[in-house]
Amino acid sequence: MSRSAVLAVLVAAVREVRPEFAGARITGDEHLGGELGLDSVARVELLVSVEDTFGIEDEVDPRIFMTPRTLNELVEQIVVAEDVCP
C-alpha cells in the first residue's frame, strides 16, 4: 500500500470523525491531538477505516495509532507495519 493511499484514507476518516474539517485542507503535518483534536477513541476509528479499506484486519497493531504526533508519522508507521507483516 502506498503512503499517499494511506494518507487519503486517514484524511477521509478524520473528516468523518471531525466534520468541522470537511472543507479544510489537511496536509498530513497537522498534530493529531492539538490541531485535529483526535482522542484515543477517534484514533481507533482511524484504525478501523484503514483496516476496512485495505483489508488488513488484525495485521496492524492498534498501539501504533497512539504514539504518532502527526498524520504523516501515522502513515509511516502503518506502511512500515504492513511491510513487516508476514
Image (cartoon, rainbow, N blue to C red):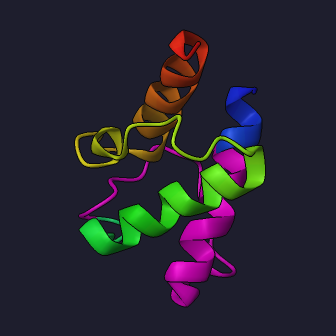
> Magenta region: which residues?
7-34
**Front one among 46 and 8:** 46
Q: Residue furthest bottom?
A: 20
Q: Is residue 25 visible?
A: no
45 lies left or right of 66: right
Residue 76: percent from left, percent from top: 49, 26
- In the image, residue 71 sits, relative to residue 17, either above or below, namely above
Q: How many marks?
A: 0
Residue 3: percent from left, percent from top: 67, 29
For the point 25% across and 48% down, the residue is 66
- In the image, residue 19 sits, relative to residue 10, either above or below, namely below
For the point 36% across and 46% down, the residue is 62
**Is the C terminus in the top left, top right, bottom left or bottom right quadrant?**
top right
Residue 45: percent from left, percent from top: 48, 69
- In the image, residue 77 sits, relative to residue 30, either above or below, namely above
- Whether 21 is among the magenta residues is yes
**Is the N terminus in the top left, top right, bottom left or bottom right quadrant?**
top right
**Front one among 52 and 30:** 52
Residue 72: percent from left, percent from top: 49, 36
**Front one among 10 and 52:** 52
50 lies left or right of 38: right
